[in-house]
Image (cartoon, rainbow, N blue to C red):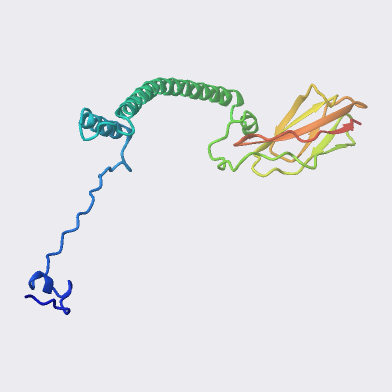
Amino acid sequence: MALYDSAATYDSGALYDGATPAAQPTTRMKKIALGLSKSNPSNTAQFADGIVESMTGNANFPTPDPALTVLTNGAQGIRDKQAEIEAKEAELSVLRGQLGSQNDALKNNIRKLADHVEDKCDGDVDKLRSSGFSLVGDPTPRGPLGQVQNLKVQTTDNEGQLDVRFKKVNGAASYMVEHASSPDGPWTLATVTTRTTHSLPGLTPGQKYWVRVRAVGTTGFGPWSDPGCRIAA
């Protein structure tokens, strides 16, 4: 009769005739490799097409979630949008060509006008700069010109003459001086000068005149100054 061995345990292996059972291998669940993080629209659509083709009628996946039609419609949506973009790009290409032609035409007209100004000014620097064109050798533009400040209009001992003085504007190459018999104009160009002082002769004695000045430079024209006024002697 066999006796029960109280010292025998499962760990000791005595109940298995001295043999320890072999360890069972652990099965790791496989994961799908997508690689979608850097996929462009065309590749994403092709990827979806391939999955739909493989899963259509596949008994392993009788009710896909989302439905395969969702992937099919999404891929077709990408192709439709790509076709729309290509059509727009073709249209944009035409528009860019038209824009380039208009730019070239405007450049040619600006060059033609510059030739006209040079011919009419006959080398007069002040007249040239009053046109708004910059001259060869002028400093590089630094920004918009400021408003002429501290405009002073003064009477003189000369009959029918007023003197004008104002503060220099940084970046100005010259100044346009205008006068009028009314603060609302019409304004008459008196001179274009490189100086910050100027005399206005030939005015009507006893007549009140308004005077305004603006700077001219390589960036164009500055704003008109606040007008000053005085009665001509």
In the picture as drawn, the residue positioned furthest to the front comes out as: 1
Q: Quadrant of the C terminus?
A: top right
Figure quadrant of residue 51 = top left
Task: Provide residue 202's location: percent of width, then percent of height.
Answer: 83, 26
In depth, the one of 152 and 163 nearer the eye is 152
Q: Where is residue 99 in the image (x, y as percent from the top left)?
A: 46, 22
In the image: residue 143, left or right of residue 26? right
Quarter of the image where one finds residue 121: top right
Expressed as whole percent of the image width and height from the top left, the position of residue 9 reads 17, 74
Which image quadrant: the N terminus? Answer: bottom left
Against 145, residue 1 (above or below) is: below
Which residue occupies the extreme bottom position in the image? Answer: 7
Q: Which of 135 and 106 is in front in this view?
A: 106
For residue 118, side relative to residue 20 (left or right): right
Which residue shows up at 54% across the image and 25% down it?
Answer: 114
From the viewer's side, name the closer residue of 155 and 66.
Answer: 66
Note whether 12 is above or below 25 in the view shown: below
Dividing the picture into quadrants, the one containing residue 86 is top left
Q: In this view, does 221 lie above or below 110?
A: below
Q: Percent from the top left, x then y, of residue 84? A: 38, 22
